Amino acid sequence: MNFDPQPFAAARRAYVGDVADRVRRFLPMVRRQAWHVHGTGRPGVELDDLVQAGLVALTECAQKHDLPTEDGFAAYAKMRVHGAMVDLVRRAAPLSRGAAERRRHLAQAETALRGQLGRDPRPHELARAMGVGEADLAAMRDASAPLRFDSIDECYSDQNAAFAAQTPDSFALLSDAQTRDAVIAAITELPDRLKLIVQLYFVEELNLSEIAEVLNVSIPRVHQLKAQAIDKLRASLEGVAQVL
């Protein structure tokens, strides 16, 4: 089957057009999306702010999108514009619905109690009025507090332990690997009976009485063999690792 790309190439050239022209033609879509998102009732975001966020997203779409049909661009632009507006709402109103409800409930209880007492209620008074403990009240306040978003560039510091990596550095990894290899080599050099003592005591975590039963020897003999094994390991690992 022969495919003629010429009609599609012509359509692509006809549609590429001017970025400003694309933005003008799809501006009504941006306004409709802004009214729709604003109508959800989330506080803290003005309609003009939503339109501005949508225009920025639409302009980026117009600059990057080059499909040959207007339908393809319209679907792509609508998705990006709506996403930009939703992101703006989330940044401006970071409280979840549950947290907002808890915050409203707290404010109502404080207002009612303030009217009764003629002053700000103390924590134990508010907790009693709400039928919760003071610890539960404190937890409720923390859970309903709004989130704060700071730029990573503004709050980052090399001296702040909060930004420290949790993974060990390369030197620590290399040191651990070398120590592990040395311990393995030292245990391998032990006589078979002493290796068995090390295995049963340190790996299987048997006590001296249990090891004596396994080896069919007395407990003092097990203690003696264990001491011999540790002495040999200390000698082999001197300067490399400390054997307790």
Image (cartoon, helix red, strand yellow):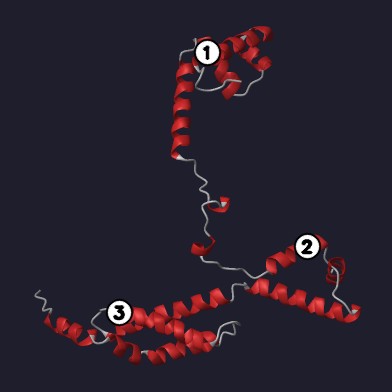
- Placement of 13 over or under 187, stated as above or below: below
Q: For the N terminus, give its image quadrant.
A: bottom left
Per the model, the C-alpha gap separating discs 2 and 1 is 58 Å
| Numbered badge on residue 63 | 3
Density class for disc 2 (Cα within 10 Å; few <14, some 14-19, many ≥20) is: few
Q: Position of residue 244 (x, y in %)?
A: 61, 20
User: Is 119 displayed left or right of 166 in the figure?
Assistant: right
Nearest to the eye among marks 2 and 3: give it: 3
Per the model, the C-alpha gap separating discs 3 and 1 is 72 Å
- Placement of 244 over or under 173, stated as above or below: above
Q: Which residue corresponds to mark 1? A: 235
Residue furthest out toward the left: 2
Residue furthest out toward the right: 117
Type of amino acid under label 2: Asp
User: Is 2 displayed left or right of 150 in the figure?
Assistant: left
- The residue that appears at 54% across and 74% down in the rendered structure is 91
Type of amino acid under label 1: Ala
